[in-house]
Amino acid sequence: MQQQTSALQRLAKILNDAILNSLSYSRDAAAIPILLQSIDVPDSSSHFIDFFSILSTAREEIRKMKGRESSCRVIEKLNDYFINNINITWKDFAKYIDDGNIIDLLHSLADHYHTQNPTIFLESDFLDRLEEQFNSLLDEIIDSDLSNNLKRFLTKQIENILYAIRRYSIDGTEGLEKAIKSFVTDLVMVEKHIDKKDKKNPIYSRCLAGFSSLLVILRPSPYDVIGVVPAIDDYYRPRIEEFIKNWQEVEENTDETSTITEIMEKSLQLSNKQPQKSLQGKEQKSLPSSQINEEPPLEMEANLEDEDNF
């Protein structure tokens, strides 16, 4: 089962799942519990905030699209309707969604958004197995003989990745990008402080290979690398087997003298993300350079404490 990364598609999925969930409730039941039950995140207490966060992000996505600015009003009305009718029954809320054809409209906007902002799909299976890989790596770090400071640093970074995976239904790929970029930024700052013994530890090399392989999948996107976009409705879908293979190959080509930048370059070189693999049987369309979206790098703060103690 694929999970699209845009907030528009995630919002459509939440509303559609709410309709399915409502089958086990009375039509006169309160709408909010039914709706929030459809938001699949670990911390149930934040569901209400998460819903409005998705509404806000969806509105921003519409504003990025050419010729669809007026559609922002649909999200704004949904936002206002939800706030002004906090005690509404599911019967009335479902009628509002149905009368406005809101779910179909959100799907249409999501498709249009992806034609202007090509991105990736992450399959549910990919996310599940990715979580398994990083949970396993976390166990290895905890049981390793790495120095305590480095162990704390790596543990925190992996926990950020796991948190982003669990919140994928809310934050999408952006959450994973933020976590992985945070790791790279922080590591660049502290690499020179890491003890040589730690750098020779195979667990450390395994961590660098895993993080760099994930970053290559997420950003740069295959379109940044190969300079093409697929035909409409066909997007790059990473395969977990390719990710694991890349991770293993990068790890085999990593030693204690390798910097995170060098490892990222090696990961990109070894990546199997070729256009014919990602877009089998589909015509590829080149974008003029003026139409290629260039996204400024995220500004991240270091998460490392006592970095001079490495």
Image: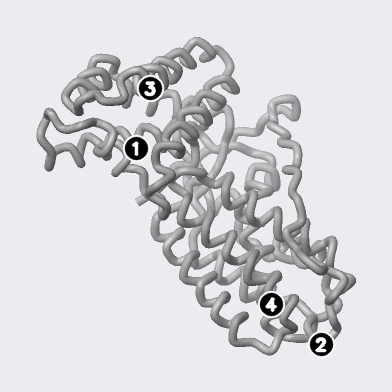
Residue 253 in view in this figure: no
Q: Quadrant for residue 145, please give it.
A: bottom right
Tag 3: amino acid: Ile
Tag 4: amino acid: Lys
Say which of marks 3 and 4 sits in front.
3
The C terminus: image quadrant: bottom right
Whether the residues at callouts 1 and 4 have beta carbons within 8 Å, the answer is no
Q: Quadrant for residue 99, please give it.
A: top left
The residue where tag 4 is placed is: 151
Q: Earlier in the sequence, mark 3 or mark 4?
A: 3
Residue 85 at what x, y percent from top left?
30, 20
Q: CA distance from mark 1 to mark 4?
A: 38 Å
Judging from the image, what secondary structure is the residue with disc 1 in? helix
Judging from the image, what secondary structure is the residue with disc 2 in? helix
Q: Is residue 250 above or below residue 4?
A: below
Residue 122 at what x, y percent from top left?
47, 51
Residue 115 at what x, y percent from top left?
53, 29
Q: Is residue 74 above or below residue 146?
A: above
The residue where tag 3 is placed is: 83
For residue 292, side relative to residue 189 (left or right): left
